[in-house]
Amino acid sequence: MRTKEFELSEVKMLMDLVTYSKFMEVEFSKEIVDKLKLLLNQYELEVIQSNEHYPIFDKNTKTINQEVLHNIEEISLSMRRKEKIEFDYYKYGLDKRLHKQGENRVSAYGILCENEFYYLIGYNERYNDYSFFRLDRIKNIKHMQAAYIKPKQPIKEFIESSVYMFGGEKEKVELKCDIRILDGVLEKFGKNIEIQKLNDDYFKAKLEVNLKGLKMWIMQYIEFVEVLTPKILKEELLTILQEAIKRYNNQI
């Protein structure tokens, strides 16, 4: 029977998620973990503290932006009020610090969690199109009185067609894939895609996605994926591979 109280395993899971979430700044993660510990009794707390002697190592990839949760609140407020927002957008420089890249005016439509990061999805006035923005790269959100632009297509449909946060027009694609990457295909594109067994070693996957992001995904699995259609995608990938071969041949 379920209870309203948290089990030790549930609190430990939440603590681990907060500790190793890339979108949360280190000190803020520690603050939340301390609050979660207040849910435990003395015995459970001793169990947790004993486990802390056996650390889980990460790759030092947590954000240095302290405004992430504030951004979630402000973006949620703008969506509820149907208000545009303006914000500064940052990217890392070679000095490993965040540097301002410019200002953006956006009609916010939703927040998406992907690859351990939160993204804002909205209509970007600069490009007159949908865009994704990492929440840990956003600072100084301001609410605007300018007219809010309503979505021109269902947001769920736009998200499902996007790959690696690249949106745009959907294209029908057929891929011949090694059976060893079946898990990777389903985890990336979902279980609603059409797949067909070709033999014991290969299967065919039919997708409707944005080609720009798909190219990046295919390059990640280049040894295991062959594009069957469309022809333009095959040609673009061939050009990329030929340029790469040329660069490496020049180094030999």
Image: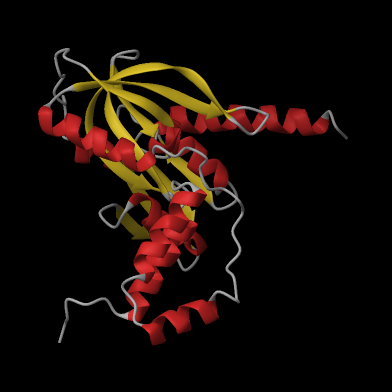
Q: Where does the image place residue 130, in percent across and percent down from the top left?
A: 29, 25
Residue beneath the point at 83% across and 28% down: 250
Residue projecting furthest to the left: 81
Q: Where does the image place residue 108, in percent across and percent down from the top left?
A: 23, 29
- Asked whether, in this view, residue 95 is left or right of residue 30, the answer is right
Q: Where does the image place residue 202, in percent across and percent down from the top left?
A: 47, 60
Could you tell me if residue 172 is visible in this image?
A: no
Instruction: Identify which residue, 116 or 211, lies in the foreground.
Output: 116
- Please determine whether, in this image, residue 185 is positioned above or below residue 108: below
Location of residue 6 (image quadrant): bottom left
- Which quarter shows the N terminus? bottom left
Residue beneath the point at 57% across and 68% down: 56
- Asked whether, in this view, residue 91 is left or right of residue 109, the answer is right
Could you tell me if residue 14 is visible in this image?
A: yes
- Please determine whether, in this image, residue 76 is positioned above or below residue 225: above
Residue beneath the point at 51% across and 77% down: 49
Residue beneath the point at 51% across and 38% down: 216
Q: Where does the image place residue 217, in percent across and percent down from the top left?
A: 49, 43
